[in-house]
Amino acid sequence: MNEDPKFCRQRAEVERSAAAATDLARVQERHLQSAATWDRMAERGEAFLRSKALKAALAN
């Protein structure tokens, strides 16, 4: 799994674009679900990076 928030946000945008490009409701739903998953992974990665930075700051 990729924890890079920037990559995850980009993938979410790709999924939202794919959802907008199709007329099929179930395909749109799948793309939007995938985008939500990528957004959650980005949020988790951002939280991890903040935690890591805080730990580093406290260690100094």
Image (cartoon, rainbow, N blue to C red):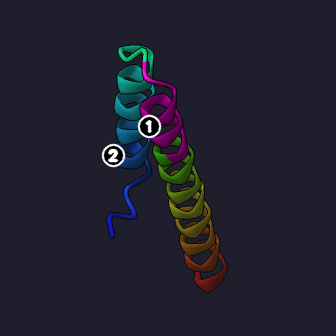
Q: Secondary structure at mark 2?
A: helix
Q: Could you tell me the amino acid type at mark 1?
A: His
Q: Secondary structure at mark 1?
A: helix
Quadrant of residue 2 in the image? bottom left
Image quadrant for the C terminus? bottom right
Mark 1 or mark 2: name the one nearer the start of the chain.
Answer: 2
Q: Is 59 positioned to the left or the right of 31 in the image?
A: right
Q: Nearer the viewer, residue 50 or 17?
A: 17
Quadrant into which the N terminus falls: bottom left
Which residue occupies 42% across, 29% down?
Answer: 13
Between 52 and 56, the one lying in front of the other is 52
Task: Name the residue at 62% across, 63% down.
Answer: 47
Question: Could you classify mark 1 by the number of other residues whose Cα lies within 10 Å: few (under 14), some (14-19), or many (20 or more)?
Answer: many
For the record, the magenta segment spans 24-33
Instruction: Give the Cα separation between the discs numbered 1 and 2.
Output: 17 Å
- Check disc 1 and report the residue beneath it: 31
Give left or right: position of 32 versus 23. right
Task: Please provide percent x and percent y for residue 28.
Answer: 47, 29
Q: Is residue 19 above or below residue 55?
A: above
The question of residue 41 being in magenta is answered with: no
Decide which of 43, 53 is in the foreground and name it: 43
- Which mark is on residue 7? 2
